[in-house]
Amino acid sequence: MTICIAAVATNRSKECIVFATDHMVTTNVGSFEHNIAKHAKIKDDIVAMLAGNPLIFDELISVDKKASFEEIAGQIHENFLKVRTETIRRQLLRPHNLELSVIHQMLEKPIQNPIQQALLKSIFEFNLGTVLLLIGLENGKAKIMELGEGAINNMRRIHFHAIGSGSNQALNTLLFQRHHEAESLNSAIYNVFKAKRNAEVMPGVGNETELLVLHEGGVKKIGSNEIKALDHIHEEELKYGKSQETLLKLDFLSQGQKRLRQ
C-alpha cells in the first residue's frame, strides 16, 4: 500500500497544507521503493494523493480543471464509480460472456442458482482497493477530502487526515501532537514528518519521504537538507525521555520504594 498525510497549518495568518507521501510501490511480486510520485497537481491550488492502484490514478483525476474544489471532488467520486463498473465488467463478467444487463435481470427474481449467488457476491464485495486524498486552497481556506467508491468524507473539521496502510499510526501521531489548523508552518511540517516516520512500522509503507507544502504560491517541496534536519530532530526527541537528567537521577530500587511481593 502506501501512506499519504495532509495537515492544515497557518503561515503569516494564511492557511496552507503540509502533505507527505512515501515512494513504496506494491505489486504481485512484492513491495519496493520506486521514484513514482504518489501525488499529482490537478491545478495550482489543488493536489491529489493516491493510496492503492497507481495505474488508475490518471483516470480518477481526469476532471474539469476550471471547476471548484467541491465540484472536482464530486467528479473524482464519479470517476471512481465508473472505473469500478468497468473493472467489474472486464474482470468478472466478460470472461463468462456476460453483461451488466444480465445481472439486473438476475436481481428481478429470487436467486437460487449457487453460481449466480457466487457471481453476485463477488460483484457486491468487489473493491478497487484504492483511496484518494484531495487537498486544496479555496477563498483562503484549506480543504481536505477523502474520496473512494463510498461516500465523500470532508476532513476539514479535524484539520488533518491520512490514508494508506500506515494511516492509523499517522493519525494517532497527529492526535498525540494535538495538531490544529492554527499550528505554525514549521510545527506542522514536523508533525507531518513525525507522522510519516511513525507510519513506517506498517508493511507497505516505504522509508523514503516526500514532504511538501501547498500554499498560496503553489506547491513547495521540502529539500533533502531540511529532511535530514527533521530526521535529526526526530532522533533527538526519541532519545530525550530515555536520557533526560531527571530520569537518570531516579533510583527505582532504593529502600524508599515499595518492594514487589515475592
Image: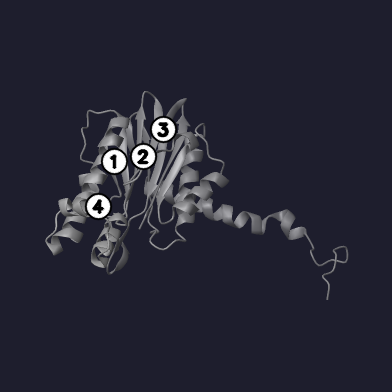
Cα–Cα span, label 2 and label 3: 22 Å
Q: Mark 3 Cα within 10 Å, few/some/many (few <14, many 20+)?
A: many
Between 63 and 191, the one lying in front of the other is 63
* Circle 2 crowding by C-alpha within 10 Å: few under 14, some 14–19, many from 20: some
- Sequence-wise, which precedes: disc 1 or disc 4? 1
Q: Give the residue drawn at x 45%, y 36%.
A: 8
Q: Which residue is mark 3?
A: 16
Q: CA distance from mark 1 to mark 4?
A: 25 Å
> Which callout, 2 or 3, points at the residue further toward the start of the chain?
3
Can the viewer see residue 116?
yes
- Quadrant of the snapshot with the N terminus: bottom left
**x, y percentage for residue 95?**
14, 64
Determine which of the numbered discs, if any, sits on residue 77 in the image.
1
Q: Which residue is mark 2?
A: 152
SS at circle 3: strand
Whether pointer 1 and pointer 2 mark residues with C-beta atoms closer than 8 Å, the reply is yes
* Residue 240 located left or right of residue 183: right
Q: Amino acid at mark 4?
A: Leu
Which residue of the protein is positioned furthest toward the bottom in this rendering?
262
Measured from the top left, where is residue 74 in percent x and y? 29, 35
Q: Residue at x 25, y 52 (%)?
A: 107
Callout 4 secondary element: loop
**Residue 107 marker:** 4
Q: Specify which label sits upstream in the sequence, 4 or 2.
A: 4
